[in-house]
Amino acid sequence: MTETRADNVTWLTQEAYDRLKSELDHLSGPGRIEIAQKIEAAREEGDLRENGGYHAAKEEQGKIEGRILQLQGVLENARVGEAPRTEGVVGPGMTVTVAFQGDDEEVTFLLASREESGAPIDVYSPKSPLGAAINGKKVGDKATYSLPNGRSMTVEILDATPYVGG
């Protein structure tokens, strides 16, 4: 097994890994066969320039191939289990509560791969601007990150505990 850089690793639960692997297996096997049959059936209808069914099937094929590549990338860099975590230090697999500077609002979320979207709470990617800014910080630390509009936002980390599911 080749070691990958820590920031390239996607930590997944066994359930998420199995779900993604199952989707990949379906798309790269029966999914490809089904779309090839749709394309062939549409091709037999005649003139391809004015054949809506053919063009729709080709577009669907492109989406399937894109999703296959995406799944392969995630699974290739996936580690099943739990990321090493330290109570009070923000990292993947942690439930994090932050307060936005200049606002009374607090937000609690799971810092994890978007592929963990089955979690019962909001999931923020460690690669997102907020996730990258707070990763490795301790409770009580402040972090500043850039918003899409170019402005900066500062948050204070109020809590970081290992995610225990829900």
Image (cartoon, helix red, strand yellow):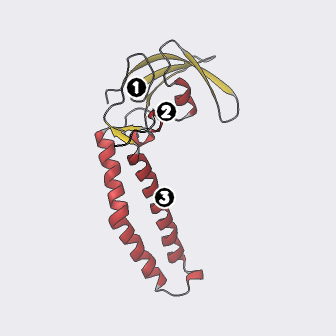
Residue at the image point whose x is 32% and y is 58% from the top:
25
Q: Earlier in the sequence, mark 2 or mark 3?
A: 3
What residue is drawn where x is 48% and y is 66%? 60
Q: Check contact, mark 2 vs mark 3: CB within 8 A.
A: no
From the image, tell me which residue sits under label 3.
Answer: 66
Q: Residue 70 at x, y = what percent?
A: 46, 52
Distance from Cα at disc 1 to Cα at disc 2? 10 Å
Disc 1: which residue: 94
Percent x, y for residue 150? Answer: 70, 32
Toward which corner of the image does residue 13 lie, by quadrant? top left
Quadrant (top left/top right/bottom left/bottom right) for the C terminus: top left
Identify the residue at image location x=64%, y=24%: 153
Quadrant, the N terminus: top left
Residue 83 lies, with reference to residue 98, above or below; the image says: below
Q: What amino acid is found at the position of numbered circle 2 in the picture?
A: Pro
Amino acid marked by disc 3: Gly
Instruction: Verify CB contact (< 8 Å) between mark 1 and mark 2.
Output: no
The residue depicted at 36 percent of the width and 30 percent of the height is 83
Q: Amino acid at mark 1?
A: Met
Question: Mark 2 highlights which residue?
Answer: 126
Q: Extreme right residue here? A: 150
Cα–Cα span, label 2 and label 3: 23 Å
Mark drawn on residue 22 = none
Mark 3 and mark 1: Cα distance apart in space: 30 Å
Q: Classify mark 2: helix, strand or loop.
A: loop
Residue 122: give x, y in percent of width and height.
45, 33
Q: Secondary structure at mark 1?
A: strand
